[in-house]
Image (cartoon, coloured by chain):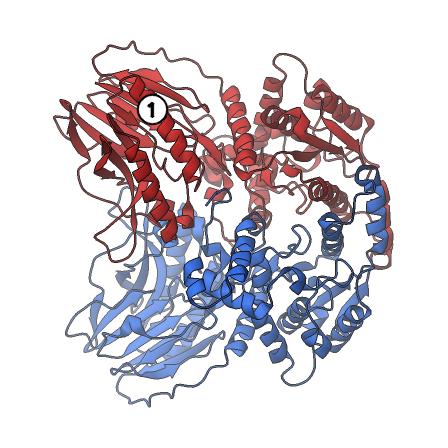
Chain colours: A red, B blue
Amino acid sequence: MKIAIVQQNYTVGDFGKNATKISKAIFDARQQNADLIVFPEMSVCGSFPKDLLKIEDFEETTMQTLQRIATESFGTAVLIGCPTYCEDEKETKLYNSAILIENGVITRRFNKKNLSLTESKYFLTDKEKNVFEWKNQKIAVCVGDDCPDNDEKITLAINITCRRFKHKSKKDFKQFSDCHYPVLSVNQIGGNTDCIYEGNSFILNSEGKLIVNLPYFKEDFFIFDTEKDYEPIDNQDVDTTALLHDALILGIQDYFQKNGFKTATLGLSGGIDSAVVVALAAEALGSENIRVLLLPSEYSTSHSITDAEGLAQNLSIQYDIVPIKDIYNTALKSLSPLFGDMPFSVAEENLQARIRGLLLMAVSNKFGNILLNTSNKSEVAVGYGTLYGDTNGSISVLGDVYKTDVFNLARYINRDHEIIPINTIIKPPSAELHPGQQDSDSLPDYDTLDKILFEYIENEKDENALLQMGFDKSIIEKTLRLVKRCEFKRVQLCPALAVSIKPFYEREIPLISKF
Amino acid sequence: MKIAIVQQNYTVGDFGKNATKISKAIFDARQQNADLIVFPEMSVCGSFPKDLLKIEDFEETTMQTLQRIATESFGTAVLIGCPTYCEDEKETKLYNSAILIENGVITRRFNKKNLSLTESKYFLTDKEKNVFEWKNQKIAVCVGDDCPDNDEKITLAINITCRRFKHKSKKDFKQFSDCHYPVLSVNQIGGNTDCIYEGNSFILNSEGKLIVNLPYFKEDFFIFDTEKDYEPIDNQDVDTTALLHDALILGIQDYFQKNGFKTATLGLSGGIDSAVVVALAAEALGSENIRVLLLPSEYSTSHSITDAEGLAQNLSIQYDIVPIKDIYNTALKSLSPLFGDMPFSVAEENLQARIRGLLLMAVSNKFGNILLNTSNKSEVAVGYGTLYGDTNGSISVLGDVYKTDVFNLARYINRDHEIIPINTIIKPPSAELHPGQQDSDSLPDYDTLDKILFEYIENEKDENALLQMGFDKSIIEKTLRLVKRCEFKRVQLCPALAVSIKPFYEREIPLISKF
């Protein structure tokens, strides 16, 4: 028996396009004599539709599209993910299902059991056994993180899923550790605002060894022959920075393409964050679609401007230099009846950042370029950035990437030749909002900061646990204090491409709390 | 038997303050010979703590505080809400419980059964019967929206809850419609960032008639004597605008007080939204704690300035006039190498709004005043406002109030004498970003718009249902198109005081969708 696994990129609610893509794969797989063709979880409607699932018309279009796909499936069988009505309930609820289509007719459905909290807002769980017999095989079907049902006679399991990329998280196949039969796991790829499905669909043999490994972040297709023997794949070392890079590229591409956007803008400061964002954006969207601004102030060092110009030239992107000094001085003059001779403070620092944000938005509005946000996760965590200035943007490219990983990305981008000027990578990070300012004036050094933040945010360690890990008490206290007091900034941020184990949108901290 | 119901305002994580408040009420009620003293759901730790519930130290402090409260309870009994450990589970989960303390000793707990989706992230449900016998009474205890358990011999039910205010929603007591015995329902009051608990604790007699009704938005206290007869309360007509007004006042007060903030700033445009916000803020925080800016542009009409000045004078608040013309012209000059002779567009309109936002934030940063956002729900719904300009602010006062209700609030504020200049109320709304501009140039009139928005957002009616209700097809289509295309703005807004049936934070629409 031949089973095709199809790894594809869908758009939420773009039923026509999704169906065409699915039909094309059915056609191709049937040409290659596939008996069963498997598509990921939530293929028909795209993932994740959130409250669109509450709209009757959305579910009806899903059903019509499923019917259309069924009629394209003559002469073969298809297993495909989509939400389906739960008929028994008075309340209109849904299941997150895998649908079996045999020779053009929908014959079975298998419903997801372990729902995430978000899913449980829309879906019901089901206790039915998800096993069916097919051409002398007894096949277990499981959706998402579900384990295949226990059944002694199972000969094969098929998992359809939507698994997002998580930088540095290890794949352990634990979900299938009880399986004494081959397992096929089919995943979506694609960016969906913040969420990036990673692909990397795989097949395990009956000993749980990896025998097929589809690529990350690319559509692909594999026909598995149950009669054939496959060699286990050696555990290759994966370059995690390369994966992170590719995830971000796909995230940018799909954010633009699925939104119908074409061109982007951002400000180049000469620093590493904006350098990495523009390099990623140029690769994702094409240099010709990027227009950047250099927005020097009187506190900008000359190397900041030359580094930023060098970068723009290396990438062959359009850039303009718009000094902010005149606007800054005019604003201060307008405010002078209020400010009098009060000393320079955070108000003046933030004013510069907000003038930059205002100019970038003016260019964005005038020319229709989408503003890319350049904040990184370390900054977002400790609130090191000006609200309505540095935090502006339609999508944050690095908002879920720690500063130390931004450096890794910069070196990776420069792997073949210097794109990002080396000076940008080696100089001490600075916001350049007052003379001689460096990030290290107000923050712990990024190596330490990122380690503490990682343990605190991704691993949910508390202060005591961090102390026991050997971090300095005063640095822990300072870091946690900073994180706790800037929740008000995080709630106003644009979405960030989610690439970590614990993106900020999964943290829910009350804005008001004395704890 | 005498039962005291205690309606109080708590702060999340402020265990010391919450406990002191609770102990004081126990002392007072015992003085008045109360046999049982009832406090609302989640009193000990405040509501809602979100991910703080995942911190071991938070739960342990809750338990210690509960013990402290228990030791203050000698000579009486207390029923009080707080999260408690669920001992049987390996995974550390919690119950949302009502704890019975008898004579200083914790003797029973009753756990919430129907959890909201948010709660189910932290709490387990329980199937145990929540009934206990006490001084010849058989008492059912239920938490939140739970109905009292069925039991023929129940003589009294006690409901402890955290119910937020919802403008114009009718109280129907449906939850207790099966109760043939008195019901005591005890609610929190208080603002907690966006959420405002309304108080209005009540007692129903055994015929389901309302006999006791504590005030909205105020701490209060009532001792119910099971031996006594109480007259049913006539169904009074409630002034819904007055309630909305009081909810917003409490929301502002608690946002500031619980955050440790004292002074506020905002921009007065001469329009109705900022006028209502400043009047509410002056009442909530005191005129002496408000400092406003008038930020006229060359497109501002003279009456806008005089109306705004009149308002500031009526309220006796400090105001400064900072014209934005110079900054605007300097910014345009700086951008002229890029903009050339391209015609005036939304870029220039937004530039003005962003200069205002930038000046307000400069004053906020310089003097430590918290910026109040002045957008209303109708604007937020259709995206009629400039991101990083009009949308700036720490808390949005009217972001969950439709424009037509903003007018009602203005008239209510003026009920005794003219605070908001009448011209502000009667003139056609305008953003004044280009000459002669009016909101009605780009939006349906607010009466129609608000009706459509209310049905679409609060009642979740779709396009077909709206058509059947008799709204004009082209206006429906325009409105829905506007709502759908500005999801990207809503995700970056500050929290808004939630006063409607369906605040935007409860709507989850994917940013990318072709549907």
Q: Which chain does tag 1 point to?
A: A
- Horizontally, residue B64 falls left or right of residue B483, namely left
Quadrant for the C terminus of chain B, please.
top left
Rendered image quadrant of residue B479: bottom right
Front-lying residue, B200 or B358: B358
Spot occupied by residue B258 in the image (x, y as percentages of width and height):
56, 61
Instruction: Name the residue located 58 percent from the left edge and 76 percent from the top edge.
Output: B408
Spot occupied by residue A388 in the image (x, y as percentages of width and height):
67, 47
- Residue identified by numbered label 1: A27
- Horizontally, residue B207 falls left or right of residue A457, namely left
The answer to whether residue B32 of the structure is visible from this angle is no
- Horizontally, residue A493 falls left or right of residue B223, namely right
- Horizontally, residue B505 falls left or right of residue B435, namely left
Spot occupied by residue A185 in the image (x, y as percentages of width and height):
31, 26
Spot occupied by residue B398 in the image (x, y as percentages of width and height):
59, 65
Residue B278 drawn above or below residue A421: below
Instruction: Name the residue located 23 percent from the left edge and 74 percent from the top edge.
Output: B178
Count the labels in the image: 1
Query: Element under label 1?
Result: helix
Front-lying residue, A249 or B384: B384
Q: Amino acid at mark 1?
A: Phe
